[in-house]
Image (cartoon, helix red, strand yellow):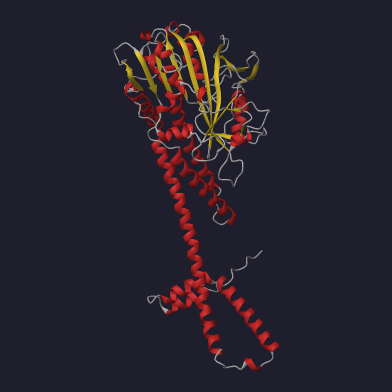
Amino acid sequence: MQQDSAAASTTPTDTKLIRHLRQILLWPVHLLPLKEEAPLQHHWEYLAPDTANPWRELDDEFGDPAEFQERHYNEFVTFLPPVQRFLYGQGIGRAVRRSYGESPIRVMRRSDVASVRLTLDKGAAPIELKIIHVDLYFFFDIDIAILALEVAADDIELGIAQEALFRFGRAYPAYWEQDCRGGHCPWLVEWLSPKGETLARSDYEKREKYLSFVCQHRAPAVAAHWEYLLSPLVLHHSDRRGLVRYRQLEYYRMPYMAFFAVENPSVLTRPDLIRMGIGNEAGASSELPYSESYLGEFEERFCYDRYCDARLGKQFTGTRFMCTGHTLVVIGEAKDRFFMNADGGFLGRFRHQHFLLFLVAHFQRAALHMFSDRLVAAVSRLDITDAEANRVFRRDIRHALENFLRFEHRYWFYEISNQAQARELYAMTREHLALDALYRDIREELQDMGNFLDVEAMRRQNETVVRLTVVTTFGLIGTVCTGFLGMNLLAWADHPLQLRALAFFAVTAVTTILTAYTVAKSRRLSEFFDALSDEHVSWRAKLKALRDVWPPPPPRQSS
């Protein structure tokens, strides 16, 4: 349902003005281990000391009471105590960096990128979005980083806003059009410095780059401007050098939140609202992006209409939230002061409380995908015939079980707030992301892995017991014999010391050789003992089992 810029300029959506637009993009990535055998990784510690890298760790907003604002308080009390400890810690001081009470989140920010210039179509006039924040979230004990990019624009037409949101957050193209433009991607993306200088440009049009990368590495490449924004983090399969390396976890289109302050919400039609809610490209206001049957339950499934009544046949009024899991969108009237309030109003809640609940849900999803990747990698390296591979497999699974246990108790929440709006929006996000089903799958996989390790340990223990039993049985014969000989049947006490020492060492050597030989044949001997002890097995079969202890050598193949 693509339209070029000329067609888009004639649609009625262009007369509908967005007074203020916000978009917050989230991009979760999987961080590769820094040390293979270390159960805990602290990737942010390798970025902080480097003066050449643009990321700097943010100071705790809860540090100085003189700077603590009412907005911070409103944000804090939104969440339940377990979530408060996750997000903010317990105020025991930043020096205790690895204790449970300290917040497990580390946030790093770069300020060298001030704005982004988007050219949506070839020959179209570019639009410039102001960058509010570029943050990188790290989580203690979980090898996940989440890039959070917040952009804003004022007085932008609805059609252009829809196209910008639809095309901007693309890690790489899905396909290419005839003019080599990346499918569903902007024609050009440019990061700009505070002085207006171009820091990096997109390369969606370089089709050969993406094709050859997938052919060589079985993994997609990342567009040049996104690589720049994450640097010095380096894509795992890239040839670039870098200590902290990452892999992609999910769909190439990044999840995002959007805030629409509309000049006149009453002119928005149902097709407009659906396109804004699901993040679709611009289109005619009178035409649905998909069939009516497909969108029949859109309002019931994806809309949170606690503050508005915009059902079919009624004019849109008030403030509407729409949540698809991949998107979280809020639409309201620009003239409403409470809606535009950046402290305690809807805009402030969108940037803080709603952002955090969206972040938590997507962090949980990314972490579960990360655990799944780790289990797949561990199983793929397993070779039951290789002792070293078995040792590495047991180590990896033990670390995964240990990390998942901490994830369950520290990061996994079914509810995050008792406030109706935050609680219900979080529930909608979790439902559309299918977090509960994914969690059950990963937990069952880990339990299967743990059961496998237990069974393997028991099998090895049983084999050891069988071998020891066989050796003990044969040793019993020797014990009886030596006991019989110890009844002064042979007067060794009267012999010279040298002869007795020689006899001792000879018996020890023979006993050692017989014991080693018995251990080597213990498996076949145990099978013979099983046949010997079975009353239902004939003596012919028992003798055959005895002969099988020494099987004939395989015939030689003639050259």
Tell me where residue 448 appears, x and y as whole percent.
44, 49
What residue appears at the point 65 percent right and 16 percent down from the top-left corner? 198
Left or right, residue 218 beside residue 307? right
Looking at the image, can residue 245 be seen? no
- Residue 455 percent across, percent down from the top left: 46, 57
Quadrant position of residue 535: bottom left
Q: Residue furthest left?
A: 313
Residue lying at the far front in this picture: please name it: 66
Quadrant of the image containing the C terminus? bottom right
Seen at 48% across and 76% down, the residue is: 544
Picture quarter containing residue 504? bottom right
Residue 39 visible to an observer of this rendering: yes
- Taking depth in this image into account, of 540 and 324 the one nearest to the observer is 324
Q: Is residue 83 left or right of residue 295?
A: right
Dividing the image into 4 quarters, which one contains the N terminus?
top left
Nearer to the camera, 524 or 379: 379
333 sits left or right of 217 in the view: left
Residue 118 image point, x, y percent: 56, 15
Vertical arrangement, residue 485 with respect to residue 393, above or below: below
Along the line of sight, which residue is nearer the eye, 440 or 182? Answer: 440
Task: Please tell me whether residue 226 is drawn above or below residue 317 in the rendered image.
Answer: below
Image coordinates of residue 348 in percent, x first then y, are 45, 19
Give left or right: position of 530 versus 374.
left
Task: Tell me how many marks there are.
Answer: 0
